[in-house]
Image: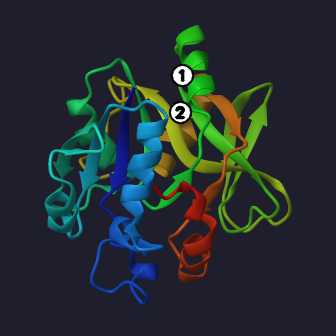
């Protein structure tokens, strides 16, 4: 299996506790967060990962090189910020398979990849991975109907519900019919409209989910992710 990790952001909210590293390299229990993520993908059967980088990309490249723990690494480095959509579009040029898993470089998700891959092989439909959380206000919420995503609700709505876990399974040619500028948001500029015009399955994961993007959750990850560190 093949994955893209979007890891090019500036990590502004985390910079007060990790000032000299890109967010994916922030240490968690003594190891770069991205290393924990890659090791998890290795265990799930991924053999090739495209790393989409920007801010302080050299620190990632110099640490990992061309492979890590048996995973071939390919780099797509943006010279100017492209947004999540523009970064993914550039990274997809390096993909060898007809579909790819997309992960965020600041989010750990213990995804049931075997089930997701089997679902893809069954009907080749794009998927958005969702996670049930007790309070959706920080993340925004997914609207779903009969196993498909029908819309996105912006941040602020409190209470339990399904959130976008920041993980997608998309065909390599997902942007073939999409006219865009170089820089665009995957979520706001593409997915918000796309889910209304074509089927996007929802996969509700039960796996451990933590976003280290703010100091509070970054500190929580120091103990929560210990079981995943090799």
**Dot 1: element:** helix
Foreground mark, 2 or 1, reads 1
* Camera sees residue 143: yes
Residue 34, percent across and down? 37, 58
Tag shown at residue 1: none
Pinpoint residue 59: horizontal percent, then vertical percent.
Answer: 19, 68
Residue sitting at 27 percent across and 48 percent down?
51
The quadrant of the image that shows the N terminus is top left
Q: Residue at x 59, y 58 (%)?
A: 227
Q: Residue furthest right?
A: 159
Crowdedness of circle 2 by 10 Å Cα count: few (<14), some, many (20+)? some
Relative to residue 16, is residue 154 drawn left or right? Answer: right
Secondary structure of the residue carrying tag 2 is helix
Residue 194 circle label: 2
Query: What is the image's colouring?
Result: rainbow
Left or right of 207 on screen, residue 170: left
Local packing at callout 1 (Cα closer than 10 Å; few below 14, some 14-19, many 20+) is some
């Amino acid at each position: 299996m093949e994955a893209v990790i979007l890891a090019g952001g500036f990590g502004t909210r985390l910079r007060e506790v990790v000032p000299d590293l890109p967010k994916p390299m922030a240490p968690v229990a003594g190891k770069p967060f991205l290393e924990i993520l890659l090791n998890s993908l290795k265990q799930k059967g991924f053999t090739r990962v495209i790393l989409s980088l920007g801010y302080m990309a050299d620190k990632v490249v110099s640490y990992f090189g061309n492979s890590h723990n048996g995973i071939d690494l390919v780099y797509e480095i943006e010279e100017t910020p492209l947004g999540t959509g523009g970064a993914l579009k550039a990274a997809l040029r390096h993909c060898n398979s007809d579909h790819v898993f997309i992960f965020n470089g600041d989010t750990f998700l213990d995804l049931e990849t075997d089930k997701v891959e089997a679902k893809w092989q069954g009907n080749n439909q794009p998927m958005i991975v969702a996670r049930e959380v007790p309070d959706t206000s920080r993340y925004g919420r997914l609207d779903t109907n009969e196993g498909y995503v029908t819309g996105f609700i912006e941040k602020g709505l409190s209470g339990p519900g399904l959130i976008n876990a920041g993980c997608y399974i998309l065909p390599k040619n997902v942007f073939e019919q999409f006219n865009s500028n170089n820089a665009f948001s995957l979520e706001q500029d593409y997915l918000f409209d796309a889910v209304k015009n074509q089927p996007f399955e929802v996969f509700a994961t039960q796996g451990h989910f933590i976003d280290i993007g703010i100091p509070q959750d970054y500190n929580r990850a120091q103990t929560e992710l210990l079981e995943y560190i090799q």
